[in-house]
Image (cartoon, helix red, strand yellow):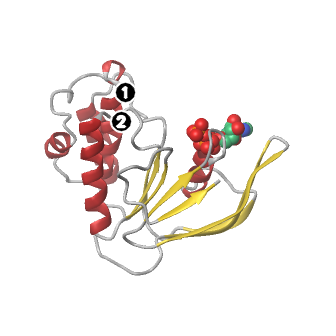
Amino acid sequence: MTVSTAPLLSASGLAILRGERVLFRGIGLTLQPGEAIVLRGANGAGKTTLLRMLAGLTRPEAGEIARPAAHHWIGHKEGIKPQETPRIHLALWAKAWGSSASIADILDQLALTRAADVPGRYLSAGQRRRTAFARLLLEARPLWLLDEPYTALDAAGKTMLDQVISGHLRTGGAIIASMHDAAGFPVTAEVTL
Ligand SMILES: Nc1ncnc2c1ncn2[C@@H]1O[C@H](COP(=O)(O)OP(=O)(O)OP(=O)(O)O)[C@@H](O)[C@H]1O
């Protein structure tokens, strides 16, 4: 991935209504290569909604988003079908993206080798989460948008994810993540809703 100094994402004046209520308004942020912004706020404050907006999945009521960089989005739902094993899931995405990355190496890095051929319906919550994160390594994309990335991960999983995240930031990537507990996460700025 080429390291650049242009913002990977910038947003200003974002607002959204939910029902009769203004969930948030006037939200702006700029994300440079190597930065990690954490979205904070109580349950229901709008963190997932804002992340979806930044990913282009939800339209803002007001405001602008410029997202010149390619991004990966990992939401609450991992998107693994009941019959899909981690190996098949990654192979399908690799084909869709034209990725030639080694799926065996990625499965190994995410400690998924033993679960590689277990259908999605039988995977544990942590294994499903690891499978979703494995997608991040299939194709290098500068911007990662992660909704509660540590959810369901055990201590080893958190350490593994921290290593993946550090590597991404070191090579000029950037992250926006919603998080209730950011202990250990390399936060460069926070946005509180
Ligand atoms: N499509 C929708 N239509 C109506 N209301 C919605 C929709 N999506 C989210 N909401 C509401 O918007 C509010 C914010 O939801 P959101 O999931 O963004 O919060 P959050 O900060 O991520 O919460 P949590 O910490 O519990 O994950 C909630 O009250 C939710 O019910």
> Assess mark 1: CB under 8 A from ligand 1?
no
Image x and y of residue 39, in percent = 54, 54
Instruction: Tell me: residue 34, above or below residue 105.
Output: below
Instruction: Tell me: residue 170, above or below residue 111.
Output: below
Whether residue 98 is visible here, answered yes or no, is no
Q: Residue furthest front?
A: 183
Q: Are marks 1 and 2 in contact (CB under 8 Å)?
A: yes
Image x and y of residue 55, in percent = 53, 55
**Which corner quadrant of the image does residue 88 belong to?**
top left
Residue in view at x 35 percent, y 40 percent: 132
Pointer 1: what residue? 125
Pointer 2: what residue? 129
Query: Is 175 placed left or right of 117 in the picture?
Result: right
Which quadrant of the picture is home to ligand 1?
top right
User: Residue 161 shows which numbered tag?
Assistant: none
Q: Amino acid type of disc 2?
A: Arg
Tell me the quarter of the image containing the N terminus: bottom left
Q: Which residue lies furthest to the right in this view?
A: 20
Query: Is 113 placed left or right of 167 in the picture?
Result: left
Image x and y of residue 110, in percent = 22, 41
Residue in view at x 33 percent, y 52 percent: 97
Residue in view at x 46 percent, y 71 percent: 8
